[in-house]
């Protein structure tokens, strides 16, 4: 094998192997023989070139693998330093074990226990667990894993959490929708809603809807969601009609100071048909386009969260007011990534305090 091919072969190796160390040992011995005979001998730099490594690597390896041997010559004990490829390999492997870093999961063991508890007990998503821990200063960036890694640990079974515990880790099937006939808009169209409401810059603009139970059942939940803070308000009403909705909404508005509820966006359900007329000059009422639930996306998402506790097809009559209040508290006190890992209650209360302070 030529020197060129020899060099190319060993340049592929990141670390010296035992075979290369043996070759290095032979090169050193040959150089020492030539030196004793006062003949030209191979330098460490040339050895490095042959092995395809840097000269410093050769010097470090010789230092690492040099051992002192004891020899008896003419009844006299002499000590000699010489390079041993076996000892060099031993030192290398020992150092590799000592310098081996602990796995990431071992370093973040405390955080994983914390995450496991919040996911299983508080039903938080991995993303919220990580974001909240960082936002509240419970853990530093070095003490947590990223969202993808946490999901991978769950898939690998490193946590007690199973995929079934992750409600959002479900692939939704696209619904096949049939084109529907246009429906008349009940009042002022969402097209006329100001831009500052659309982009969620201003506080006090709500979306409204109802959540139904069994088919044909009159009892339902009236839900409102504040667009900026995602705060949800839920009222249990006995009938799904315009009179019940108007009465319940009026009671909600009485609980808050003026300026908290500035506008309401509804769909074109018959239960909302009198909102525009009843609350004229009180709040602005806008109506989304027919069959366009995405135009009230915040409220639709809030209703989806309610469905985790009140599944479709179950009777609303099976749940008392206290149960409904409890699930609303759970949702409003869950940290949200979109709110910088604040809860909806925290964000909402901060806005209310600012309005009260400004009006004082």
Image (cartoon, grey):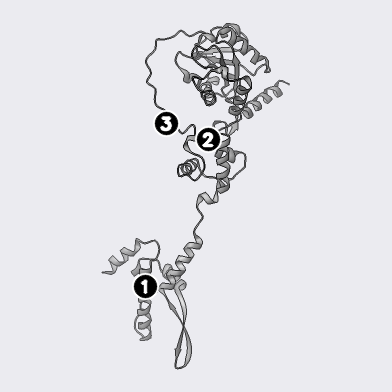
Q: Is residue 294 left or right of residue 140?
A: left
Asked whether 257 or 300 is in front, the reply is: 300
Q: CA distance from mark 3 to mark 1?
A: 57 Å
* Label 1 element class: helix
**Which residue matches tag 3?**
171
Going from N to C along the chain, the mark reached first, 2 or 1, is 1
To which quarter of the image does residue 5 belong? bottom left
Quarter occupied by the N terminus: bottom left
Asked whether 114 or 199 is in front, the reply is: 114
Going from N to C along the chain, the mark reached first, 3 or 2, is 2
Establish if 112 lies above or below 61. Answer: above
To which quarter of the image does residue 210 belong? top right
Establish if 165 lies above or below 199. Answer: below
**Which residue matches tag 1?**
22
**Which residue matches tag 2?**
125
**Residue sitting at 55 percent across and 44 percent down?**
112
* Label 2 element class: loop
Marks 3 and 1 close (CB-CB < 8 Å): no
Question: Percent from the top left, x then y, of residue 300?
Answer: 51, 21
Question: Percent from the top left, x then y, of residue 255?
Answer: 68, 17
The label number, if any, that marks residue 175 in the structure image: none
Going from N to C along the chain, the mark reached first, 3 or 1, is 1
């Amino acid at each position: 094998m030529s020197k060129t091919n020899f060099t190319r072969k060993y340049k592929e190796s990141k670390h010296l192997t035992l075979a290369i160390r043996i070759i290095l040992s032979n090169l050193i011995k040959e150089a020492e023989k030539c030196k004793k005979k006062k003949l030209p001998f191979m330098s460490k730099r040339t050895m490095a070139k042959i092995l395809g490594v840097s000269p410093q690597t050769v010097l470090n390896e010789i230092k690492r693998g040099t051992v002192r041997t004891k020899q008896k010559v003419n009844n006299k004990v002499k000590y000699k330093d010489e390079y041993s490829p076996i000892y060099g390999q031993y030192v290398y492997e020992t150092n590799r074990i000592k310098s081996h870093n602990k796995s990431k999961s071992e370093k973040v063991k405390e955080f994983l226990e914390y995450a496991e508890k919040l996911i299983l007990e508080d039903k938080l998503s991995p993303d919220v667990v990580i974001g909240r821990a960082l936002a509240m200063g419970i853990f530093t960036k070095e003490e947590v894993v990223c969202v993808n890694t946490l999901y991978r640990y769950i898939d690998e079974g490193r946590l007690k959490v199973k995929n079934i515990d992750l409600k959002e880790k479900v692939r939704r099937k696209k619904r096949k929708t049939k084109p529907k006939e246009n429906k008349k808009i009940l009042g002022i169209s969402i097209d006329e809603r100001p831009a500052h409401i659309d982009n969620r810059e201003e506080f006090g603009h709500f979306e409204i809807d109802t959540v139904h139970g069994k088919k044909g059942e009159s009892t339902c939940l009236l839900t409102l969601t504040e667009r900026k803070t995602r705060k949800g308000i839920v009222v249990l009403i006995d009938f799904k009609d315009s009179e019940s909705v108007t009465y319940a909404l009026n009671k909600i508005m009485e609980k808050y100071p003026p300026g908290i509820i500035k506008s309401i966006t509804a769909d074109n359900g018959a239960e909302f048909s009198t909102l525009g007329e009843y609350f004229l000059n009180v709040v602005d009422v806008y109506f989304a386009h027919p069959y366009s639930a995405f135009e009230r996306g915040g409220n639709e998402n809030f209703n989806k969260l309610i469905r985790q506790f009140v599944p479709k097809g179950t009777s609303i009559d099976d749940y008392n007011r206290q149960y409904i209040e409890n699930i609303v508290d759970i949702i409003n006190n869950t940290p949200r990534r979109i709110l910088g890992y604040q809860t909806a209650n925290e964000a909402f209360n901060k806005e209310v305090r600012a309005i009260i302070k400004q009006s004082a």
